[in-house]
Amino acid sequence: MSGDALLGVYERDLTVVSGKGAKLFAADGRCYLDFACGVGVNGLGYGDKAVIKAIREQAGKIVHVSNLYHSLPGAELADKLASLAFPSKVFLCNSGTEAVEAALKFARRVGGPGRTEFVAFERGFHGRTMGALSITWNAKYREPFGPLIPGVRFCPWNDLAAAAEAITERTAAVVIETVQGEGGVRPAPVAFLQGLKKLCEERGALFVAEEVQCGLGRTGKLFAYEHAGLAPDLLTLAKPLGGGLPLGAVLIREELAAALHPGDHGSTFGGNPVAAAASLAVLARLTAPGFLDNVTRRGEQLFRGLRALKKKHPQIVDVRGLGLMAGVQFAGGSGDVVKGLRQRDVLATKAGDDVLRLLPPLVVKPGEIKTALEALGAVLEGGAGVAGA
């Protein structure tokens, strides 16, 4: 089986067949330490027993229920998310880009005919569908598919003065990744987030926390916006939410939800019972006593090691991130570093051209972080990441 019939929109040459914890096993028998984590999807790694049990049990009852009816797992999941985040109503969908699309529609519905514009940020990435693509900054993603939705203004990162100029009486929502992922693993400064929220409140725009990649424990808190001590008007979630199954969610502040009515939006597979059951198992694990504290400890271990490498290797320009979401910026690009790590049986990804993105499972072990750091050190000793190399 060659897979030659698959559309060539991905660059890939590795076939994986199984996984356990933070390890992936390839078809050729090679074992990799996975610090790409399905680009953040596999927050509990591979083979989590509680998630697998939940999937099997729910699949034995019913796999799909039309959204003309309730399903018990979907209803329970919505209640759980609202109780963990802020008083809200929950829309369940299938992916991060669908969650962003829904948030954009909801913001326009709440704002009414006079509020049709959006404010987004440089380096932000929000998805591949047409609305999410419209608020994605990098022109290489947007321009081949234009014209996109009008009325999007891109602001510099961490520039409240520019945001104050961009947010007007026509702004439906300000959409920000509380930690940028694809844009280079950039945590939004606390004062910046707080200032944006205040501007939104003053000018009647909605504040959307886009946490498709950085939410659900990745930063050491259940939601990344908690680091700033605020609550958004809308929250988008996906990636780790379904325990590896397709699942996304939008939470909209309870008092705003009255603007939405039956027929305003929908999703055939949104809130699928099997995915929702898996998600409940994920949330039970994330909220178990001590779990997020351990994520914080493992993140501290990872960043200590990365900063030590920065002192030894001048090709490292910056180390940044939160929790177990790390970005290492290189003077000479990160592509050769990613390749070098793979040669040493560690999987990672780029975030832009010059940043190595490390997203280990939240259940990563201390020894696995040590192994990954040693592999990165060996790659850098060979000169990877040096400008002009």
Image (cartoon, rainbow, N blue to C red):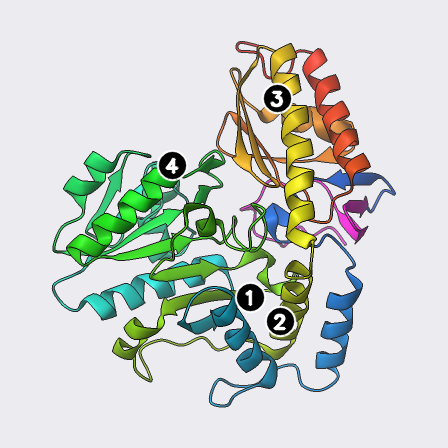
**Marks 4/3: CA–CA distance:** 24 Å
Q: Locate residue 329 relative to residue 4 in the image: left or right.
A: left
Q: Which residue is mark 4?
A: 123
Q: From this viewpoint, is residue 237 visible?
A: yes
Earlier along the polypeptide chain: callout 1 or callout 3?
1
Q: Nearer the viewer, mark 1 or mark 3?
A: 3
The answer to whether the residues at label 1 and label 3 have Cβ atoms under 8 Å apart is no
Earlier along the polypeptide chain: callout 4 or callout 3?
4
Name which residue lies at 71% across and 80% down: 58
x, y percent for residue 138: 37, 37
Name which residue lies at 73% across and 73% down: 54
Secondary structure, magenta segment, majority class: loop
Earlier along the polypeptide chain: callout 4 or callout 1?
4
Q: Which mark is residue 247?
A: 1
Q: Locate residue 339 relative to residue 263 in the image: left or right.
A: right
Q: Which mark is residue 275?
A: 2
Magenta span covers which residues? 1-25
Compare residues 223 and 25 and report the one nearer the observer.
223
Local secondary structure at mark 4? loop
Q: Is residue 258 above or below residue 32?
A: below
Q: Please, which residue is most extreme toward the bottom here?
A: 69
Identity of the amino acid at label 3? Arg
How packed mark 4 is, by other alpha carbons closer than 10 Å (few <14, some 14-19, many 20 or more), is: many
Q: From this viewpoint, is residue 245 visible?
A: no
